[in-house]
């Protein structure tokens, strides 16, 4: 990669450029997520194109944020190291994802839980790459550069540093960086397969889109129609969904992007069509009063007496029995969209 891939002129400055990049990264954890396709809607990972030893990690990494799909991660690794976990570049980049030591010191994670964050460990490298990619995607999005795909800017930032992207208001005019971005995007097709949109009624699509994020951490204030994001207050260090953002995401994507419902549970239970308990169907949204007079929790009914929801801090998107004592005892209201 060069700075992670800076052009040679920057490398000639010794460790200064690396130090600046490391200083600029403020970090914050990006919690791990389950094995399921993420990133660009409609595309999944062509697992046959990925070395078998790395498939599960690529799938898991591809759930870190909506901007970074498993196929993009795989294409990036091929471009960086050709799937060689012991690769070393002439300028000192290391491992599958070719992290420079200064960047690794800031971002490296011990994904395989062996006690050491090691750039030569495929698991550590892949998960760190996804987390760094996701941070870069948010960083370049904050620059509000018009008419440019966030993925392209993210890849350019991975190679040349986010400061260069901000300076040039786009992909920097470095031959290496421009070639790097183009090379990876060409390879994405190799690692992609088309996933059909969930078939059937609107409610079934709501369920299917929500279920894709099973295992995603709860993050208070986190989540948008684009996928998991960092929350606020006690959710600030966690990338994920809260209860209402998961519902908003699922309804938005079930509608093909045509319907954006309110962001809060209180707003969501005033929208859509009121439904009685006797008419409850998969995909219906159930509002709960858990802690007082306001509708402070929402969940998606998935059938067979079960709900899918983002429960609370410290838990993940998961299912629960609607008839369990806790939820059954709380006031409920049901809404249907679509």
Image (spheres, rainbow, N blue to C red):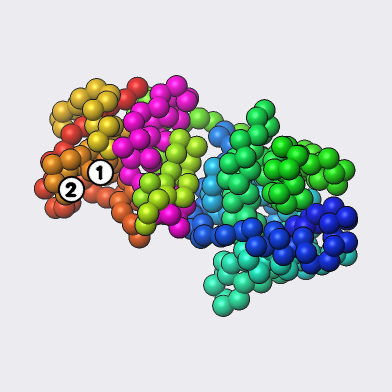
| Whether residue 159 is situated above or below residue 105 in the rendered picture | above
The 10 Å Cα crowd at callout 1, few under 14, some 14 to 19, many 20 or more, is many
Circles 2 and 1: CB distance less than 8 Å?
yes
Q: Which residue position is annotated with label 1? A: 297
Q: Quadrant of residue 9?
A: bottom right
Q: Quadrant of residue 24?
A: bottom right
Q: Is residue 255 left or right of residue 104?
A: left
Residue 288 drawn at (x, y percent): 20, 42
The foreground one among 236 and 251 is: 236
Considering the numbered disc 1 on the image, is that residue within a helix, a strand or a loop?
strand
View extreme (bottom): residue: 115
Q: Which mark is residue 290?
A: 2
Q: Residue at x 62, y 72 (%)?
A: 117
- Residues shaded magenta: 235-264
Q: Earlier in the sequence, mark 2 or mark 1?
A: 2
Residue 248 drawn at (x, y percent): 38, 34
């Amino acid at each position: 990669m060069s700075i992670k891939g800076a052009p040679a002129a920057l490398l000639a400055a010794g460790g200064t450029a690396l130090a600046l990049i490391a200083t600029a990264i403020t970090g914050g954890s990006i919690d791990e997520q389950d094995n399921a396709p993420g990133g660009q809607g409609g595309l999944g990972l062509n697992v046959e194109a990925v070395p078998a030893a790395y498939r599960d990690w690529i799938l898991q990494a591809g759930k870190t944020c909506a901007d970074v799909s498993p196929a993009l991660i795989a294409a990036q690794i091929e471009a960086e190291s050709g799937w060689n976990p012991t690769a070393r570049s002439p300028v000192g980049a290391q491992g599958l994802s070719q992290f420079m030591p200064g960047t690794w010191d800031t971002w490296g994670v011990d994904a395989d839980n062996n006690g050491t964050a090691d750039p030569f460990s495929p698991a550590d490298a892949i998960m760190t790459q996804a987390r760094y990619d996701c941070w870069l995607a948010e960083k370049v999005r904050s620059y509000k550069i018009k008419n440019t795909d966030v993925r392209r800017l993210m890849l350019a930032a991975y190679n040349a540093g986010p400061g260069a992207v901000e300076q040039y208001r786009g992909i920097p005019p470095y031959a290496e960086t421009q070639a790097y971005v183009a090379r990876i995007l060409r390879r994405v097709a190799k690692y992609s397969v088309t996933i059909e949109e969930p078939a059937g009624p609107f409610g079934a699509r709501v369920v299917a889109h929500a279920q894709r994020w099973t295992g995603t951490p709860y993050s208070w204030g986190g989540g948008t129609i684009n996928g998991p994001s960092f929350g606020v207050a006690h959710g600030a260090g966690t990338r994920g969904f809260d209860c209402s953002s998961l519902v908003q995401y699922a309804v938005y994507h079930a509608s093909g992007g045509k319907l954006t419902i309110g962001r809060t549970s209180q707003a969501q239970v005033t929208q859509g069509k009121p439904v009685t308990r006797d008419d409850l169907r998969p995909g219906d949204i159930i509002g709960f009063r858990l802690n007082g007079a306001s509708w402070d929790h929402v969940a998606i009914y998935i059938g067979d007496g079960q709900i899918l929801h983002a429960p609370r801090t410290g838990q993940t998107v998961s299912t629960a029995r609607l008839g369990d004592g806790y939820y059954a005892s709380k006031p409920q209201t049901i809404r249907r969209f679509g």
